Image (cartoon, rainbow, N blue to C red):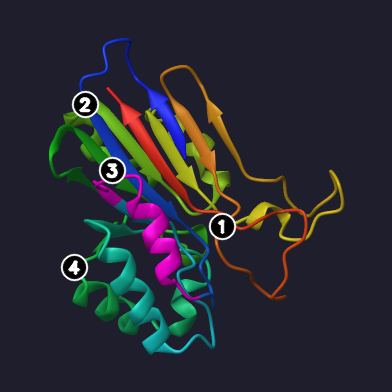
Amino acid sequence: MQQLNMTQKENRTLTIFFISDIHRRKIDKTLLRRVRRHGEIDLVVIGGDLAEKGVPLNRIQKNVSKLSSLGPACFIWGNNDREVGETHLREILSSSNVKILDNEGVAIDGHSDWCICGTDDPSSKNVDVEASIQLSKQFPYTIVATHTPSLVRKVEEYVKPQLMLSGHTHGGQIRFGKFGLHEVGRFCDLGGRANLISNGYGTSLLPLRFGAAPECHVIKIHY
């Protein structure tokens, strides 16, 4: 669990569950129980690569249904999601009332000072960072989710969000000590702001992880 303290006077808590890079993996009841132990979830953020080519649609449907049972949910596109058919995935997400952040933002229910903005993935050739963060101008506090960490710097040219969420790299997935294709995931507290790059929950290409454990995150923001 990660915690971010916005001010010295902590009157309210915004609790977010972030999960990315599920790919072929199944969401099980044990995970749901562990998340619920942290109390009410204000927002579930599915951070891309919910699916990939070959994942049965009924498995995706069950995963989305279970995740949306935790609380209000939103989704951003990853580089593999459209491999199962964009129309199919949109229908699955819509059936569980999951909001797709198509280069846009939405207010967070119950926390009137907060919005979450999300970008499409660069693989779509449809990323519009400026459009994605337009809503942030109307809110004191902003969360931005982008599947690919490479977009973080681009986002920060327009806005300095209180929380940045991304995944994609799997922490390298297979690492030998400090060596891997990508850096291991990390949570950086920037003093009233934070940047989370997740190792992700599943695997891609090889059904194996070594030195980069799977993870998902309960984040409590005190403000």
- Disc 3 element: strand
Percent position of residue 121, x then y:
46, 59
Amino acid beneath label 4: Asn
Instruction: Please state which amino acid type lies under the numbered disc 1.
Output: Gly
- Is disc 4 in contact with disc 3, using a CB cutoff of under 8 Å? no
Q: Is residue 123 above or below residue 130?
A: below
As drawn, the residue found furthest toward the top would be 8
Identified at 87% across, 53% down, the residue is 176
Write the residue at 47% across / 29% down: 194
Q: Quadrant of the C terminus?
A: top left
Q: Earlier in the sequence, mark 2 or mark 4?
A: 2
Sequence-earlier tag: 4 or 3: 4
Task: Work out how far the residue at label 2 is from the one at label 4, CA to CA, in angstroms.
Answer: 26 Å
Say which of marks 2 and 4 sits in front: 2
| Cα gap from disc 3 to disc 1, whole angstroms | 20 Å
Pointer 4 residue:
97
Q: Which residue is mark 1?
A: 200
Residue ID for mark 3: 116
- Residue 12's disc is 2
Rounded to the nearest angstrom, the CA distance separating label 4 from label 1 is 23 Å
Kind of residue at badge 2: Arg
